[in-house]
Amino acid sequence: MTETKPPADPLDADPALASAILEIESHLAQDGWDQPARLYALVDTARLVSHEPALAAAMGLDHASEQGSLTAIEQDQLSPEVELERALETISWPPEVLGCAAVVERLVLPPDADAQIPEDETEAQRYAREHPDRQEVRIVAGATRHGATYCALRLRAHDDDQSVVGGIDLVPGLLALLGATLTDEPDTAESAEPEENP
């Protein structure tokens, strides 16, 4: 008996990135809902162990068990006044950061509601909050310098680990913004340093 595959074949996913995203999602799920947006640098675990042994030891990492994996390092909390998507437009990463991940909670509406969404942003947000068929979703999305992407989605209405949906292209707009932070354009973007230098 074969398993039913999601629309994006999971075999296309970068296993190190997918593992890092699912680990972030699982960790955050323990703290419940209504959390602020978060941003993570993804660094090569073996390099972190080599260059920051004390930090790696505190995180329970070692060479033998973590070869070929990515470690997520949470960045300073984003300003609540600035939407995650806008904040990403001002960020670039130093070369030792191989990827990045973002976490955000959003309201999603059924496709048939699109035609009724007001053009005014404030009105659109109110419309979404008051829509009877709205769903709350937590999105964990990540991208790497070599173009890999992965997302994990959890609906508040189906808040269990077995109902988390994963795929490489579930939120293309957010993934594009994350990918853009990994290009080297220092004159147009503000550098975001990891809290601990990998």
Image (cartoon, rainbow, N blue to C red):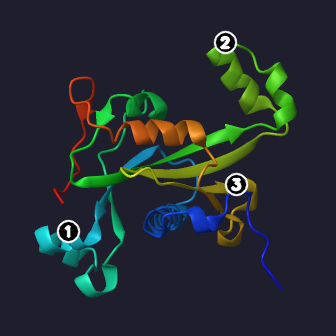
The image quadrant that residue 11 belongs to is: bottom right
Residue bearing the label numbered 3: 155
Q: Position of residue 135 (x, y in %)?
A: 75, 45
Residue, x 53% and y 53% (percent of image)? Answer: 140
Q: Residues within 10 Å of mark 3 (few under 14, many from 20)?
A: some
Q: Earlier in the sequence, mark 3 or mark 2?
A: 2
**Nearer the observer, 133 or 101:** 101
Q: Is residue 184 left or right of residue 117?
A: left
Identify the secondary structure beneath mark 3. strand
Q: Is residue 88 above or below residue 167?
A: above
Q: Earlier in the sequence, mark 3 or mark 1?
A: 1
Residue, x 28% and y 70% (percent of image)? Answer: 45
Q: Is residue 111 above or below residue 101?
A: above
Q: Is residue 106 left or right of residue 191?
A: right
Q: Which mark is residue 61?
A: none
Three-letter amino acid code at disc 1? Arg
Q: Earlier in the sequence, mark 1 or mark 2?
A: 1
Residue, x 21% and y 49% (percent of image)? Answer: 95
Three-letter amino acid code at disc 2? Asp
Q: Position of residue 8 (x, y in %)?
A: 68, 57
Residue bearing the label numbered 1: 47
Residue 52 in sight here: no
Identify the secondary structure beneath mark 2. loop
